[in-house]
Image (tube, grey):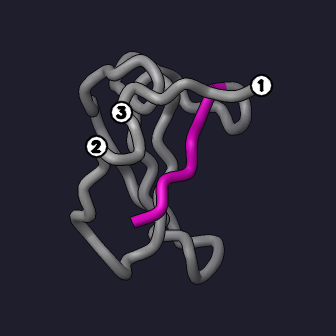
Amino acid sequence: MTKEFKLKPEEFKDIAVGYGGCIATDMITVHGKKVGYMYREEPSNEMDSGWCIMWGKQVMQRHSVGMSYLRF
C-alpha cells in the first residue's frame, strides 16, 4: 500500500543534514497532525538518529502504530 504524505517531496526542507533519520508516526506524516512529543533511544544503525516523533495522543507499541522513516 502506498502512503499519501501530507507534504510533497518538494515541500521538504533540510534542517539537520548529516544527523541520520528518524521515525515519525503516520498521524504526523500522513494526516498532518502537529508534533506532540518526541523521545530518543540508542540509534539502531549509522543511518538512524534514534529519534521517534509522535502526535501526542498515541500509545506507542512497536509495529502497531503506522510509522514512516524520515531521513535528514
Residue segment shown in magenta? 65-72
Query: Which residue lies at the image location 58% right of the left edge and 82% below the top edge?
Result: 46
| Quadrant the C terminus occupies | bottom left
Q: Distance of mark 3 from mark 1, alpha carbons?
A: 18 Å
Q: Which mark is residue 1?
A: 1
Write the residue at 46% across / 41% down. 24
Q: Identify the main secondary structure in magenta.
A: strand
Q: Amino acid at mark 2?
A: Glu
Apparent side of residue 11 relative to residue 46 in the rendered image (left or right): left
Among numbered discs 3 and 1, the one appearing first in the sequence: 1
Q: Nearer the viewer, residue 18 or 9?
A: 9
Q: Amino acid at mark 1?
A: Met
Q: Contact (CB < 8 A) between labels 3 and 2? A: yes
Q: Which residue is mark 2?
A: 11
Question: Does dot 2 land on a helix, a strand or a loop?
Answer: helix
Image depth: mark 1 or mark 2 in front: 2
